[in-house]
Amino acid sequence: MYDKISHMEPLLPEQTADLEDMAREIVGRSAALGGQLHPLSQQPVVELLRLINSYYSNLIEGHSTHPVDIERAMRRDYAADPARRDLQQESLAHINCQRTIEEWLQREPDLNVAGAEFLCRVHKLFYDQLPDELRRVKDEETGEMLEVTGGELRQREIRVGRHIGPLASAIPAFLDRFAGFYRSGAHHGVMPIIAAAASHHRLMWIHPFLDGNGRVTRLYTDACFRRLPLAGYGLWNVSRGLARRRDDYMAALTWGDAPRRNDYDGRGNLSSEGLLRFCRFFLEVCLDQIDYMQGLLKLDALLDRIRGYVQLRGAKVAPAPKPDRPPLKPEAAHMLQEALLRGEVGRGDMIRVSGMAERTGRMLLGQLLDEGLLVSSMPKGPVRLALPTFVAGYLFPDLYPAQIVG
C-alpha cells in the first residue's frame, strides 16, 4: 500500500526535451489563436466552450447531457424526467465552478491552485450544487451506497480498476507534497505546462476524494493554464480532446500508474517512462484542440459560414431557436458579420451596414436580438455577437455531436 510520499515519485519525467518542444508549440499556437478574433468576439466563444467543456467533462464520467439541454437548463428550462434533470443540474454545477474559479484567480493572486485548500474548495463547490442522487456513490466491492460530502477527503481505501490509491490516512501528506512541488511559480520557462500535464496524472493517482476526482482534476488543470497565464486559453480546452479519446486517456493514466521497471526507468517508485508517455499524450491532446479551434476560427471561413447559415435560414432548412420563427433576410448576414469583425456595433451603424431602410432594418435587428444571435448590455445600447447552441453547431462543425431526436 502507498503510505509514503516517496511512493509518488517522480513528479516530473526525467527526460523532457521533446515535451519542452511540444510545450513551446502550445504557447505559440495558443497565442496565435488568441489573435484571430476581436477580443469582444472572443467572449461568446469562451462562453460557448464553457458549456461544451461541461458536456465533455460529463461524458468522460459516463454522463451524457447534450449542449442544447445544458443551455435550456441555464434558462431554468429543466426536463420533466428526473434523471435527465439531475444531469442538467450536474452540467450547470460544472459551468458555475469554472466561472467561480476564474473569479477566485482574479481576486486571489496568491492562491495556490495545487494546494489542498483549493482542491477541497473546488470539490465542495461542485458537490454542494448537485442533486442528492448524484452525491451518492456505490462501493463496487461491498455494494454499499456511500454519501459524498463536498470538500471532504476520503476516509476509506479505494481501488479504481487496477490502481489502488494511497492509504486514506496518508492523503494529507501526499497533498502537501503535491502542493509544494506543483505550486504556482515553482517552475519556469515552458516547464509549468509540462508540470500541469504531470500533475494532472498525479492528482488522479492520489485520488483524494471518495468521488469526483476526475472532475476536480480537470477543473484544477483548467485553473493551472489560467494561472500561468496561457495566452489564447479559453478559446480551447483540453476536456473535449480527452473525451474524444477517452480510451486512450484511460490507457495513458494507466501508463502513469506503472511502477518503476528497471535501473533505466528513473529513480522514483513509479515509472518515469510511464509518466513521460502520459505527459506526451496530454500535450498532444492540447495541440490537437488548439489546431482544431484555429481552423474553426479562421476569419474568412467563419464569415462564410455565417453567410451560409443565413441563406439556409432563409430557405427554412437551417436550425432556428423555435420551429415557428420566421426566416432570416439575407441582410442579417451583414449584421452578424459586422458584429464578429468589430466586436461591438451601435444600433444605428448596424442598420446602415445592412443597407436596409430604417424601419425594416430595425425590425431585422430586433429579430436577431430576440433570437439571441445578437445581445446588448442595455435596452438601446450597442450590440455584440452571441452563439446560442442552435447556431453554434452550424458555425462550428463537429464541436459537439448533433442532437438525436426521438
Image (cartoon, rainbow, N blue to C red):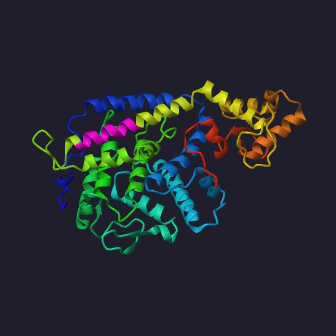
Q: Nearer the viewer, residue 51 or 248?
A: 248
**Mark count:** 0
Quadrant occupied by the C terminus = bottom right
Corner quadrant of residue 47: top right
The reply, left or right, for residue 83 in relation to residue 20 is right
The residue segment tinted magenta is 274-285
Asked whether the viewer can see residue 69, the reply is yes
Tell me if residue 345 can be seen.
no
Up-down relation of residue 233 to residue 18 (above or below): below
Give the image location of residue 395, x and y in percent.
63, 36
Q: Is residue 247 left or right of residue 63?
A: left
Task: Say if the magenta span includes residue 277.
Answer: yes
- Indicate the position of residue 304 as horizontal and vertical percent values: 66, 27
122 with respect to 359 (left or right): left
Identify which residue, 194 or 290, lies in the foreground. Answer: 290
Was residue 257 drawn as part of the magenta stretch in this picture? no
Q: At 38% from the left edge and 28% from the top edge, which residue is drawn?
A: 25
Majority secondary structure of magenta residues: helix
**Location of residue 400 with respect to 24 vertically, above or below:** below
Question: What percent of the width, then of the height, locates residue 50?
Answer: 54, 47
Quarter in which the N terminus is drawn: bottom left
| Residue 321: % across, % down | 72, 48
Residue furthest left as drawn: 263
Tell which residue pokes out farthest to the top in this image: 300
Residue 176 vs residue 13, the one in the foreground = 13
